[in-house]
Image (spheres, rainbow, N blue to C red):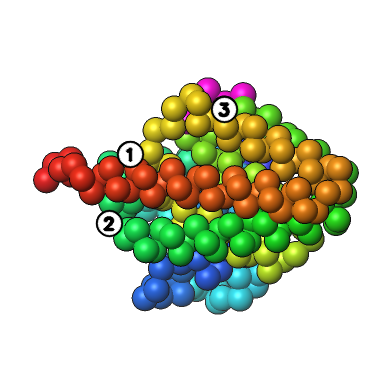
Amino acid sequence: MQSTAISTRALDLLLLLRGSEPEGLGRAEQVSYQIETGILMGILAEGDRLPTESVLAAELGISPITLRQSLAALRTKGLIETSRGRSGGSVIRRQIELTDTQLQHKLRETSTEALRDLGDLGAAIASMSARLAASRADPKNIEHLEDLAKRHSDSAEERARRRMDSRFHVAISIAAQSSKLTSATLQLEAELMTLWWGIPVNSSSESSIVQQHTAIVDAIRERDSDAAGRAAEHHSRTEMEFLIEQHLRLIMQPEAGA
């Protein structure tokens, strides 16, 4: 398998995922969850080579033994493969694809109140990130946002569009030059992706998302903080309103296999 060392940015984002894991996991399980989430979000892609065990353990603040336990669990799931020797290491083997049934089950089981809370948090984070990005983003940040928006618009496959939308949200927080906002955005998107990705989106909704992305990028490029904040909050709330509608639809119909 052709492999490429993960970028410094990808490693930084992976580290910021700490805290997104469910409660009750041991440290090795937490690290496995971070890496799995990084793969699912597209932060880590097939063929990406992880840092050496000593380097990755130090970056994650864990012992090499704990890291080896995490990597062993990921190998068992077929997500990484590891080779030994001077040029050895662990490489991402494949992308994670949860089934629509798995994703819809989680959305069904998440309460309307919990979804509203996530929506309020998401809107607040999105608005502040976009406002700060409008005053702090550098040309590379804006170019990256434009690229993600275009890749979302051009993607023919629904899961690819969802992944680009999640990465678009994260890229706004990166453009805001705030590690705290980036960490909060990553943790929120890690939770939302297993709720949002199992729901089909019609063409009119996709067209609306494309327009919302464009409005956010335009406002950031024009250094209009108020417009950027409003556009990002509108985008976040529109997505959550759609998600709540789908949750209510799911609980009104029998669950598949029930």
The alpha-carbon separation of the residues under discs 3 and 1 comes to 22 Å
The alpha-carbon separation of the residues under discs 1 and 2 comes to 14 Å
| Badge 2 amino acid | Glu
Judging from the image, what secondary structure is the residue with disc 3 in?
helix
Q: Nearer the viewer, mark 3 or mark 2?
A: 3
| Badge 3 amino acid | Ser
Q: Nearer the viewer, residue 199 or 211?
A: 211
Labels 3 and 2 touching (C-beta < 8 A): no
Identify whether 25 is placed above or below 190.
below
State the image coordinates of residue 127 (x, y, percent, origin top left): 67, 57
Q: Residue at x 61, y 62 (%)?
A: 124
Identify whether 178 is placed above or below 159.
below
The residue at which mark 1 appears reads as: 100
Q: Residue at x 33, y 39 (%)?
A: 100
* Quadrant assignment, res 185: bottom right
Nearest to N terminus: mark 3 or mark 1: 1
